[in-house]
Image (cartoon, grey):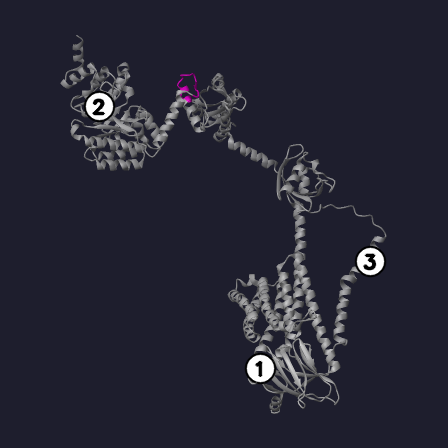
């Protein structure tokens, strides 16, 4: 990351010697860079072409051989000599991998008395013994590693010293491998010169290849490139394969290899060379060849390298060579074809040089394999492993040089690109020493900090940032590799994010201006917890405020929560638009906020509903605050433009207890707010911690939990309230089943809270199914005891009617109890029926198919519309009790009930009036023409056993006036006349 700061130093003042020095430097550079290397190259070329070598040997003469292969029985020298006399002379002998010993005889040429040497140059000869054929005296014997007599180990083979020529010699030799036996006669001095030339060439090849290998190894270590490491190993193996061809493999670094190591080393060298060549080949060209047809066979070839190496250590030389020829021959052909494909696909010069290096090695190796396998020795004169080693090494050096050139160009380009990026980067880049001095900066950093003249080593970090920031940064980079720190400028107006790391004793860092980002983040954080219109907390924000305040309850600190609802605020939006309503809401929040202090917070949880959290505030003090809010809300009109609005608010205040959840606290405060709306407490209702409302809420929650449990119907039972006919009171025993629940302590819970809790927890359908099944079972069980029962009313919950599963279960229950289903009358609340008229009509039609009667309950309450009666095929209208109770005190109620009765008559329906509490009410209902009456004037709800003892609903009447009225109704006497007669 560190880059030197770019700046232009002031150029030195020109001096007279300046141009002269520059000219001198140019001349010296011309000589050292161009002329000296060119001169060395020309001098070397002249030496090679025109000058004489000190190591050129001459005078060698091939010697003809008479040769005999020893069969299974060993021959004595005399017997071998006799058989050789019958054999014609030949120039050379090829063993073709035969290891049978060979007897041969030859005659040297020359002037009498000359001392010459006869060389046997075969590197595969392992032993030789020579005799004087006349005296049968042994001239000498030699093996790899030892020699005696006139025989000695010379170059790659052996040599025999003769003190007198011409002479005849008899020899016996043994071979391992594809050996060629030949004999060459040398003058002693020329033989010595030839030996020197052999070792000189061997040394040059070893030295050159090892130096090149060391160069490649150093390059691999510096550049950390495994490719160069592989290539270095391949060069050494290439050297050994070349030495094997030239007979130089008997030594290494001038040291003779022990004779017992020679053959195993040769086999291992060939196997490792094949493996290394294939590995390097795949490293260089595997990505190219993976998409060609050569990939599968090359993969097979890779698998064959392992058994080939094992064979080198297990099999004898004679058996190993055919396997080696087969595998390497196939591999060389396959890799050559792949190489042609690579060259055709890739024009990169590095690949071309590597390919050329491989090509030379492949061709020479292929020539050696073919010549050895087919006995075509002429091929080795053109291309052998020695020439391959030299040529491939030279080409490899060119490839490495080309690779280095490419890497240098890439490095220069990357450096230029990095410098450009460093200068053009929009982020601030810098390098600091551990004392806080800027060592380098880019223009973006100078622009951020507002100082374009930053001097390296003199401009300090503390000039732009507060004291202590540098210490924090230093501590962070020493503690973790990649440190991040958000800081402010010295004047506090801007925010920055620093990312830094410690490298080479310096702090390398990036500075990013996050001022706008910080502002945006703070705005988003504010919007996440605040209402965008009023700027008070939203629901999420006030929940967090409540959780924070509730944590202090454990320490004994009080907490109050207020629920604020604006009365009839919707009219402002409807009449004057939401813009006016929004402005009023803003002013409302402003007025409420003026009454709060400390950590008290407002949250908007609905259109015109607010929650106020008051931590560390006793409920009595909170009540004073809320009373002030109520008064302030209504105190002055809200001015919006040229209009003034009056807004009244109601507040429910509760004292929060330890462990109370937010939703429970808001629910309780909402209930208190609804109570405050009733004007009972002049806009404020307060529930202290032990108030009845909390106990009711707790009881409701317990009931919801109970109904949500595994046994929701446990404790349920039915009571029945008689419904009396006003046409013939003693002729029928009709009733309505009423749901009750028995508490564990024996108390009886009425149906209202039970149904409300069931609807809240989604168990209304379960309750109604139980009531339906229990009612029908009871009717079926006591059908003979209820001969006068025409109908039994059962009220359905609105949640059940809209539950498709309940509807299906109801039809199933009615189907199983079809014998008594016609006695059932299902009551459907008018508001529920209107909620989904189509669904209600479909349900009515389905249950009426079983003979079930349908009553519309609470008719006349809510949003009654006579038009919907045409859509619902109901049997009974059950008049809402609010019109019935105290009907005689309100003439309007009489008129309404009479209108409902007339409507029912015209539609062919019966009417039932509920909440009839006294005889006067019953009499009025009878006069109006109501068909049935239900209420305490007839009877309260009874246990089911009581109904089995009665003959009619009138049997339960205990009020004398109601009983007299019933007698009149039964006798068909005019009610009004009978009553006046009783008064007289």
In three-dimensional space, the C-alpha distance between marks 2 and 1, rounded to whole angstroms, equals: 132 Å
- The answer to which image quadrant residue 309 occupies is bottom right
**Neighbour class for label 2 at 10 Å: few (<14), some, many (≥20)?**
many
The image quarter in which residue 702 lies: top left
Residue drawn at x 62%, y 38% is 485
Q: Which quadrant of the view contains residue 432?
A: top right
Q: How far apart are the two marked residues, 1 and 3, measured between alpha carbons?
A: 74 Å
Viewer can see residue 404: no
For marks 1 and 3 on the same chain, the one whose residue lies earlier in the sequence? 3
Query: How packed is label 1: few (under 14 Cα within 10 Å), some, or many (20 or more)?
Result: some
Q: Nearer the viewer, mark 2 or mark 3?
A: 2
Is 974 contained in the magenta span? no
Q: What SS does tag 3 mark?
A: helix
Circles 1 and 3: CB distance less than 8 Å? no
Label 2 sits on a secondary structure element that is strand
Q: Residue furthest left?
A: 971
Residue 445 sits above or below residue 673 on the image = below
Q: Are marks 2 and 3 in contact (CB under 8 Å)?
A: no
Residue 24: numbered disc = 3
Residue 873, given in percent of the width and then of the height, sits at: 24, 31
Is 43 left or right of 280, judged from the image as shown? Answer: right
User: Residue at label 2?
Assistant: 723
Residue 247 in view: yes
Which percent across, then down, holds residue 411?
Answer: 67, 54
Q: Secondary structure at mark 1?
A: loop
The residue identified by callout 1 is: 100
Dot in front, 2 or 1: 1
Mark with earlier residue (2, 1): 1
Task: Please provide the residue range marked out in magenta.
Answer: 672-689
Farthest top residue in view: 984
Task: Give whichever of 745, 848 is nearer the camera.
Answer: 745
**Residue 675 colored in magenta in the image:** yes
């Amino acid at each position: 990351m560190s880059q030197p700061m770019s700046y232009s130093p002031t150029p030195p003042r020109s001096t007279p010697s300046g141009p002269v020095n520059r000219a001198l430097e140019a001349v010296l550079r011309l000589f050292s860079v161009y002329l000296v290397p060119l001169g060395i190259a020309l001098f070397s070329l002249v030496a090679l072409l025109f000058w004489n070598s000190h190591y050129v040997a001459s005078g060698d003469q091939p010697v003809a051989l008479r040769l005999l292969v020893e069969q299974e029985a060993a021959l004595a020298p005399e017997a071998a000599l006799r058989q050789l006399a019958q054999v014609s002379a030949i120039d050379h002998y090829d063993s073709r991998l035969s290891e049978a010993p060979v007897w041969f005889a030859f005659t040297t040429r020359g002037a009498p008395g000359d001392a010459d040497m006869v060389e046997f140059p075969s590197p595969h000869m392992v032993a030789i013994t020579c005799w004087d054929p006349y005296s049968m005296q042994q001239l000498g014997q030699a093996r790899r590693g030892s020699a005696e007599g006139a025989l000695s180990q010379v170059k790659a083979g052996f040599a025999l010293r003769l003190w007198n020529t011409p002479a005849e010699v008899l020899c016996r030799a043994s071979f391992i491998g594809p050996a060629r036996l030949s004999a060459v006669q040398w003058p002693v001095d020329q033989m010595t010169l030839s030996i020197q030339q052999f070792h000189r060439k061997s040394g040059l090849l070893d030295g050159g290849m090892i130096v090149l290998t060391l160069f490649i190894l150093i390059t691999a270590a510096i550049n950390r490139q495994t490719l160069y490491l592989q290539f270095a190993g391949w060069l050494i193996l290439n050297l050994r394969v070349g030495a094997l061809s030239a007979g130089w493999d008997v030594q290494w670094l001038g040291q003779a290899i022990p004779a017992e190591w020679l053959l195993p080393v040769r086999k291992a060298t060939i196997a490792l060379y094949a493996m290394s060549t294939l590995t390097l080949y795949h490293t260089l060209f595997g990505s190219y060849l993976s998409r060609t047809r050569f990939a599968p066979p090359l993969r097979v070839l890779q698998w064959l390298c392992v058994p080939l190496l094992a064979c080198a250590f297990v099999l004898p030389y004679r058996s190993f060579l055919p396997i080696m020829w087969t595998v390497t021959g196939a591999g060389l052909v396959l890799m050559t074809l792949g190489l042609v494909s690579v060259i055709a696909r890739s024009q990169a010069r590095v690949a071309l040089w590597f390919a050329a290096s491989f090509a030379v090695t492949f061709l020479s190796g292929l020539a050696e394999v073919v010549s050895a396998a087919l006995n075509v020795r002429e091929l080795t004169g053109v291309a052998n492993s020695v020439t391959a080693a030299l040529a491939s090494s030279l080409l490899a050096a060119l490839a490495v040089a080309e690779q280095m050139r490419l890497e240098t160009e890439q490095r220069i380009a990357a450096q230029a690109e990095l410098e450009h990026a460093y200068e053009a980067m929009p982020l601030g880049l810098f390098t600091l020493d551990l004392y806080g001095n800027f060592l380098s900066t880019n223009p973006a950093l100078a622009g951020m900090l507002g100082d374009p003249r930053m001097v390296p080593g003199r401009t300090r970090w503390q000039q732009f940032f507060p004291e202590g920031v540098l210490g924090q940064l230093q501590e962070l980079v020493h503690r973790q590799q990649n440190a991040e720190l958000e800081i402010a400028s010295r004047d506090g107006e801007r925010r920055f994010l620093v990312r830094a790391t410690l490298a080479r004793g310096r702090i390398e860092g990036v500075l990013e201006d996050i001022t706008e980002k910080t502002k945006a983040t703070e705005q988003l954080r504010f919007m996440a917890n605040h209402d965008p219109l009023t700027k008070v907390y939203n629901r999420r924000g006030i929940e967090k405020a409540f959780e924070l305040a509730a944590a202090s309850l454990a320490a004994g600190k009080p907490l109050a929560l207020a629920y604020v609802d604006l009365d009839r605020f919707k009219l402002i939006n409807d009449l004057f638009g939401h813009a006016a309503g929004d402005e009023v809401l803003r002013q409302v929040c402003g007025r409420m906020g003026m009454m709060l202090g400390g950590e008290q917070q407002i949250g908007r949880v609905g259109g015109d509903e607010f929650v106020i959290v008051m931590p560390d505030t006793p409920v009595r003090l909170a009540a004073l605050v809320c009373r002030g809010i109520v008064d302030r809300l209504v105190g002055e009109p809200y001015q919006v433009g040229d209009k003034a609005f009056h807004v009244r608010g109601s507040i429910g205040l509760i004292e929060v207890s330890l462990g109370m959840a937010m939703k429970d606290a808001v629910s309780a405060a909402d209930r208190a707010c609804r109570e405050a709306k009733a004007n009972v407490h002049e806009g404020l209702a307060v529930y202290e911690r032990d108030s009845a409302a909390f106990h009711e809420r707790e009881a409701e929650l317990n009931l919801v939990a109970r109904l949500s449990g595994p046994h929701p119907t446990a404790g349920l039972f039915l009571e029945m309230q008689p419904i009396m006919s006003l046409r013939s009171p003693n002729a029928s025993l009709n009733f309505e089943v009423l749901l009750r629940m028995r508490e564990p302590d024996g108390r009886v819970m009425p149906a209202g809270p039970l149904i409300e809790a069931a609807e809240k927890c989604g168990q209304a359908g379960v309750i109604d199914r139980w009531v339906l099944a229990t009612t029908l079972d009871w009717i079926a069980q006591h059908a003979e005891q209820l001969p006068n029962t025409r109908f039994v009313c059962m009220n359905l919950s609105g949640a059940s009617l809209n539950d498709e599963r309940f509807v299906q279960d109801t039809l199933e229950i009615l189907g199983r109890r079809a014998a008594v289903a016609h006695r059932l009358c299902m009551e459907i609340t008018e508001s529920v029926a209107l909620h989904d008229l189509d669904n209600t009509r479909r349900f009515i039609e389905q249950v009426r198919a079983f003979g079930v009667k349908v009553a519309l309950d609470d008719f006349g309450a809510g949003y009654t519309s006579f038009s919907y009666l045409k859509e619902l095929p109901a049997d009974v209208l059950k008049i809402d009790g609010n019109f019935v109770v105290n009907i005689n005190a309100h003439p309007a109620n009489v008129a309404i009930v009479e209108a409902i009765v007339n409507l029912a008559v015209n539609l062919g329906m019966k009417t039932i009036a509920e909440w009839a509490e006294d005889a006067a009410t019953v009499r009025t209902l009878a006069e109006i023409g109501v068909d049935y009456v239900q209420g305490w004037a007839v009877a309260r709800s009874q246990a089911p056993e009581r109904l089995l003892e009665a003959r009619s609903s009138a049997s339960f009447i205990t009020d004398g006036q109601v009983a007299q009225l019933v007698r009149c109704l039964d006798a068909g006497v005019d009610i009004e006349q009978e009553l006046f007669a009783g008064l007289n």
